[in-house]
Amino acid sequence: MLRRNLFVICLICGMFSIALGQWYPAYVSLIGTSELPNATAYSNGFKIATSESIHSDTLWVVYAQDDSICNWAYSIDRGVTWDIDRIMPAIWGKNNVRNPSLDVWNNMPIFVYETDSLDSGYAEIFLECPFDYCVPTRVSITNGNSTLPAIVIDDSCGVHVVWQEERAGDTEIYYSYLSSYCSMGDTINLSYNSSVLDNYPSISIFNGGEIHVIWQRIDPPCETPYSIVHRVFRDTAWSEIEILDGHWEPLEHPNLDYCHGEDSFSAAWETGDGVIFHGGYCPYGASGEYPITSVVTSVWSFFYYGIVDDINAHFYYNAIY
């Protein structure tokens, strides 16, 4: 079977300017290979993260190896070289792992992923850390097919997970909070609309401690049936749904910036013409599928997206004036 290069970390010629300084291209490296063209899809959950120290050289990555195997990789030299291992499925799953997402707490990576459950007969969401002996935690205590998880962890090790729930021709967006990665959490439905399709949730933390979630919505009877919607948890309550963008052509695969509260709200999603950025920083010439944008630290930033068979990751160095 054809094997595809994964995470080809490459450069954009020229420089990327922002108000505070200049973003400079950095370097190129190859993490690994995959048998899937969508190894890092579908942009709803973070696939790359850094250890907590702002000066850390350690990076963590998750991606699909094939239809049932996912890998995690790490680099201790800021992406120059990589080591790879396999994400092992929960013992009560059907020995498969799909659509992983990760975050880092206390210099340990925490994964969420979907696996087919032997118990419920549906795909379920599980959470685990590869460096301890906790049994993987089942996050999705729901009655549908649970897919496409995304995770973010706050400063007190509070774990926030969202996913897409499919049942009887409807899809909803669910959220769960766990006080630690070995705990059970409370679950709520963020979308609550059985007449539309809600897909591809993404979650992050902005403005210090606000929990933000965005997803794509399809409402066929509407004049502009495609939209990107947003809710935020602040001051102990969830906001009402806000429409960020609406169009008669598809708006797909939204993704939030991985900034952990160090910045204001920023996101990216696909349109028929390329990539839309809502806040944040955008390199010139950005186009393609499954966009990801992130300010990893105050010095390093990355942007990656898929074109044909390669996953392109653009690293930048910020020389602040």
Image: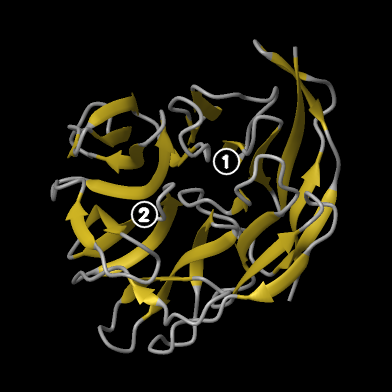
Q: Which of marks 2 and 1 is nearer the N terminus?
A: 2
Mark nearest the camera among 2 and 1 is 2
Residue depicted at x 45% and y 68%: 113
Residue depicted at x 60% and y 50%: 49
Position of 44 relative to 275 (above/below):
below
Residue 251: tell me if it is visible: no
Q: In which quarter of the image is residue 207?
A: top left
Residue on which the image places disc 2: 158
Q: Quadrant of residue 60?
A: bottom right
- Identify the secondary structure beneath mark 2: loop
| 197 vs 278, nearest the viewer | 278
Q: In which quarter of the image is residue 116?
A: bottom left
Position of 163 relative to 19 (above/below):
below
What amino acid is at disc 1? Ile
- The image's colouring method is secondary structure
Residue depicted at x 31% and y 66%: 146
Position of 267 relative to 309 (above/below):
above
Q: Is residue 293 left or right of residue 11?
A: left
- Identify the secondary structure beneath mark 1: strand
Disc number for residue 292: 1
Residue 32: tell me if it is visible: yes
The crowding category of the residue bearing disc 1, from other C-alpha atoms within 10 Å (few below 14, some 14 to 19, many at least 20), is many
What amino acid is at disc 2? Gly
CA–CA distance between discs 2 and 1? 23 Å
Residue depicted at x 75% and y 49%: 57
Q: Which quadrant does the N terminus fall into? A: bottom right
| 236 vs 15, nearest the viewer | 236
x and y, in percent, of residue 283 in the image: 68, 25
